[in-house]
């Protein structure tokens, strides 16, 4: 091991994972060991260290020691999300009576409405009346659909 692992003033145990994020490409460097090519970044916090560290799965597991969900399981959830996102546009989107595309999935309704040549994206829980409007318009229906996915299923998940 190298990097911060070699420094005795850096705590090596009892870190807490705050969040894990899928960067969608292996572009980060682990701040604990220095390993490059990290795609799934674990944000770690320690009560005696002044800043959070961004680390890879292996270092997160060694640093955290006790957890309800292991770093590998957290990453597996984000990998599953990435696979679902890659298939999102090919799902069976249907047309409503108003010619808006919609998709029912996981107990939600996702809707794309075209207005003034732009696309609005909204979703709601099937059991409730209130729609959640994404704050902007999109140039294409595909952009709006991916924005819906990212809004409902974020790339960054909180730990614990």
Image (cartoon, grey):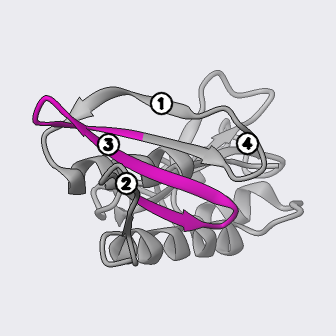
Q: Look at the image and tell me whether residue 21 can be seen.
A: no
Horizontally, residue 48 falls left or right of residue 67, namely left
Taking depth in this image into account, of 83 and 105 the one nearest to the observer is 105
CA–CA distance between discs 3 and 2? 29 Å
Question: Residue 12: x percent and y percent?
Answer: 73, 51
Q: How many numbered tags mark residues here?
A: 4
**Mark identifier at residue 133:** 1
The numbered dot on residue 113 is 3
Of the two numbered discs 4 and 1 on the same chain, state the one appearing first in sequence. Answer: 4
Which image quadrant for residue 36?
bottom left
Tell me if mark 4 has few (under 14), some (14-19) or many (20+) residues whose alpha carbon lies within 10 angstroms of its own.
some
The label nearer to you, 3 versus 4, is 3
In the image, residue 44 above or below residue 81: above
Secondary element at image label 4: loop
Q: Mark 2 points at which residue?
A: 23
Q: Which residue appears at 43% of the width and 50% of the height?
A: 111
Q: Reading the chain from its start, which is encountered first: label 3 or label 1?
A: 3
Helix, strand or loop at label 2? It is loop
Q: Position of residue 87 (x, y in %)?
A: 36, 78
Camera-nearest label, 2 or 4: 2
- On screen, residue 14 versus residue 19, left or right, reads right
Queried whether the magenta region covers residue 120, the answer comes back as yes
Q: In which quarter of the image is residue 53?
A: top right
Mark 3 and mark 1: Cα distance apart in space: 11 Å
Q: Does the magenta stretch include residue 25?
A: no
Magenta span covers which residues?
102-121
On the image, numbered disc 4 is attached to which residue? 11
Mark closer to the chain start, 3 or 4: 4
Is 1 placed left or right of 158 in the picture?
Answer: left
Disc on the earlier residue, 3 or 2: 2
At x 65% / y 21%, what residue is drawn?
50
The first of marks 2 and 4 along the sequence is 4
């Amino acid at each position: 091991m190298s990097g911060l692992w070699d420094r005795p003033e850096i705590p090596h145990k009892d870190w807490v994972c705050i969040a894990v994020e899928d960067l969608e490409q292996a572009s980060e460097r682990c701040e604990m060991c220095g390993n490059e090519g990290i795609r799934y970044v674990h944000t770690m916090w320690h009560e005696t260290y002044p800043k959070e560290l961004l680390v890879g799965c292996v270092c997160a597991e060694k640093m955290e020691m006790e957890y309800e969900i292991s770093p590998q399981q957290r990453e597996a959830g984000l990998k599953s999300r990435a696979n679902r996102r890659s298939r999102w546009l090919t799902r069976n989107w249907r047309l409503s009576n108003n010619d808006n595309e919609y998709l029912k999935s996981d107990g939600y309704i996702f809707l794309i409405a075209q207005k003034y040549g732009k696309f609005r994206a909204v979703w709601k829980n099937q059991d409730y009346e209130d729609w959640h409007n994404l704050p902007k318009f999109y140039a294409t229906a595909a952009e709006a659909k991916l924005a819906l996915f990212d809004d409902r299923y974020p790339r960054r998940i909180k730990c614990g």
